[in-house]
Image: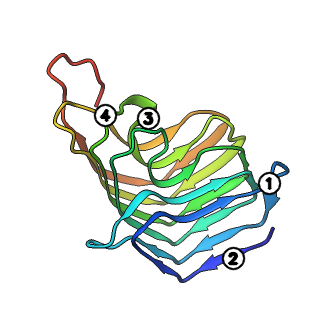
Amino acid sequence: SNNTYQANTITRAQFGIAINGPVVLESGTVITQNIIGAPSNTIGFRGISVNNETGTTITGNTVQYVASANATAGAGGIILPGSTTAVNISGNTIRNISSSASSSGTSSICAVYIGPANSSANVNANTITGISNINPNGYGARGIIVMGGIATISNNVISDIYCYQDTAHAYWP
């Protein structure tokens, strides 16, 4: 509880920052002013991952150059895959997140993922750009995915989200 991750530069890892609290939710984690990923030193799966936490603040980070070939749901920038409550994700820059995985819909590569066990999240004033799935067979890319709970999504700038369309039009981009 009450841990702070501040002003770190993290490259060449599967996860940039991964917080996995115990079954009883930990509280008060602050993740701020970190630089995660670099052009030639990418992150392999998730920039920031937070699970089993309450009252977490994720602000002022740059999450970039996440390059995943993993088809598992929740690959991308800032990911809340499990139980979370009252998480604030604001003022972050999330850019250059890519995948070559055969995954679409809610399993698509994304900048922010709010999982089904989330009970409340605020996603505000983030800049999201350059999110892509480069698989030529047509799989998805998303800016923000919300799977459950209560989420407030406001004042984000989202641009340059792209993927290929499959020839049968089976996968929504």
Mark closer to the chain start, 3 or 2: 2
Calculate the distance from the C-alpha at mark 1 to the C-alpha at mark 3: 25 Å
Q: Does residue 28 lie above or below 171 as drawn?
A: below
- Which residue bears the numbered disc 2? 4
User: As rendered, which of 106 and 17 lies closer to the eye?
Assistant: 17
Question: Which of labels 4 and 2 is toward the front?
Answer: 4
Please tell me the numbered disc located at residue 107: 3
Calculate the distance from the C-alpha at mark 4 to the C-alpha at mark 2: 35 Å
Left or right of 49, for residue 96: left
Q: Residue at x 21, y 39 (%)?
A: 135
Please tell me the numbered disc located at residue 22: 1
Residue contact at pointers 1 and 4, CB within 8 angstroms = no
- Other-residue count near label 4 (Cα within 10 Å), few / some / many at <14 / 14–19 / ≥20: some
- Amino acid under disc 1: Pro
Question: Which of labels 2 and 1 is toward the front?
Answer: 1
- Amino acid under disc 4: Ser
Calculate the distance from the C-alpha at mark 3 to the C-alpha at mark 2: 29 Å
Left or right of 24, for residue 3: left
- Image coordinates of residue 46 in percent, x first then y, are 47, 56
Mark closer to the chain start, 1 or 3: 1
Question: Which of labels 4 and 3 is toward the front?
Answer: 4
- Which residue bears the numbered disc 4? 102
Under tag 1, what secondary structure?
loop
- Amino acid under disc 2: Thr
Q: In which image quadrant can residue 44 be found?
A: bottom left
Q: In which image quadrant can residue 18 be found?
A: bottom right
